[in-house]
């Protein structure tokens, strides 16, 4: 289990993390937020690269910073993967093998056919997508207990994205690997995450299971009779829009509670529509004020 407790980090007077706390227990945890929210800074603390000004980062109860044994259990793929300038995949494999006691040559050889990359070729000559494949090849071969990913599938084609997620989810199911992933691709996270944490301005606004998050926010399409033109004031809506007589409301409550609340106004039609993670993200970060705005020239 990864525990981040009250973590604060300041760079040149800018508070990148402000008493941020998350708990990553098992499965796939998605960390989301706008640019500059503090996600990458959070991941670097979890990896033991940064030391917080206050607070702590624990891996199964042990502090991560300057803890060689803890770091040997965590593999990572940052957004900008580092490799030595003249290194081949085979060269980097030797480096990883030296740092990770559980590095599996058997798995490395099996993955060679999947990624189909020349291990003797200079990594610098690879495309961005091929470099990301090489990073996955090596990280997965480390046989980590925890895998920390920052924009992990950026640059991969759709087939390779599916292949990579298949391998990761297989490790989660078979080996009990815990995956912490930060990404702006909310549609993809929605398919793979068990839990989600939403960050903004260095703070963690909330963290819940994805199913709980979707159950506690609902989108309703409602049709009233012609005498009722707008939503009653006693119903707190995060978002309201209308098209003809069809009103769309986003409410922070369960679908059953929202339907019951509206029933006293005798609507002609009430239909609950599942919210996407992207919609939840937008409205948790400030509703319409965070949504896309029209620009008038």
Image (spheres, grey):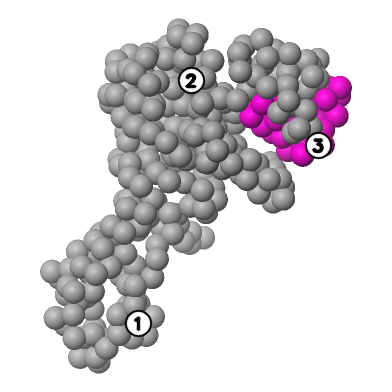
Q: Quadrant of the N terminus?
A: top left
Kindly tell me whether residue 9 is visible in this rendering.
no
Q: Is residue 155 left or right of residue 70?
A: right
Question: In percent of the image, x 51 and y 48: which residue is there?
Answer: 192
Q: Earlier in the sequence, mark 3 or mark 1?
A: 3
Q: Is residue 205 left or right of residue 78?
A: left
Gap between marks 2 and 1 measured at Cα: 49 Å
The majority secondary structure of the magenta stretch comes to helix
Instruction: Say which residue label 3 marks.
Output: 113
The location of residue 40, given as percent across then percent down, is 48, 29
The location of residue 209, given as percent across then percent down, is 35, 47
Q: Nearer the viewer, residue 103 or 52?
A: 103
Is residue 228 positioned above or below 39 on the image?
below
Q: Which image quadrant is residue 121 in? A: top right
Whether the magenta-drawn stretch holds residue 118 is answered as yes
Kindly tell me whether residue 256 is visible in this rendering.
yes
Gap between marks 2 and 3 measured at Cα: 30 Å
Q: Residues within 10 Å of mark 2 (few under 14, many from 20)?
A: many
**The magenta segment:** 113-141
Gap between marks 3 and 1 measured at Cα: 53 Å
The location of residue 267, given as percent across then percent down, is 23, 85
Considering the numbered disc 1 on the image, is that residue within a helix, a strand or a loop?
strand
Instruction: Say which residue label 1 marks.
Output: 246
Considering the numbered disc 2 on the image, is that residue within a helix, a strand or a loop?
loop
């Amino acid at each position: 289990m990864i525990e981040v407790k009250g973590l604060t980090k300041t760079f040149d007077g800018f508070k990148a993390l402000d008493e941020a706390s998350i708990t990553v227990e098992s499965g796939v945890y998605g960390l989301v937020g706008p640019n500059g929210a503090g996600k990458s800074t959070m991941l670097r603390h979890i990896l033991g690269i940064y030391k917080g000004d206050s607070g702590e980062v624990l891996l199964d109860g042990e502090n991560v910073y300057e803890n060689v044994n803890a770091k040997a259990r965590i593999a990572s793929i940052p957004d900008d993967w580092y490799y030595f300038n003249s290194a081949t995949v085979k060269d980097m494999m030797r480096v990883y093998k030296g740092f990770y006691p559980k590095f599996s040559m058997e798995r490395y050889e099996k993955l060679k056919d999947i990624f189909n990359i020349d291990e003797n070729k200079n990594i610098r000559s690879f495309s961005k997508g091929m470099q990301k494949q090489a990073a996955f090849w090596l990280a997965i071969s480390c046989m980590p207990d925890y895998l920390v990913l920052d924009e992990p599938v950026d640059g991969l084609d759709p087939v390779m994205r599916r292949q990579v997620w298949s391998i990761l989810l297989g490790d989660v199911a078979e080996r009990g690997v815990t995956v912490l992933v930060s990404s702006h691709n909310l549609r993809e996270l929605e398919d793979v995450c068990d839990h989600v944490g939403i960050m903004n301005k260095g703070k963690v606004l909330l963290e819940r299971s994805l199913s709980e998050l979707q159950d506690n926010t609902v989108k309703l399409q409602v049709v009233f009779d012609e005498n009722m033109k707008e939503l009653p004031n006693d119903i707190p809506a995060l978002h309201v829009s209308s098209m003809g007589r069809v009103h769309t409301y986003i409410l922070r409550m369960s679908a059953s509670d929202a339907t019951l609340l509206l029933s006293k106004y005798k609507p002609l039609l009430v239909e609950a529509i599942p919210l996407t993670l992207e919609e939840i993200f937008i409205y948790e970060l400030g509703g319409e004020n965070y949504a896309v705005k029209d620009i008038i020239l």
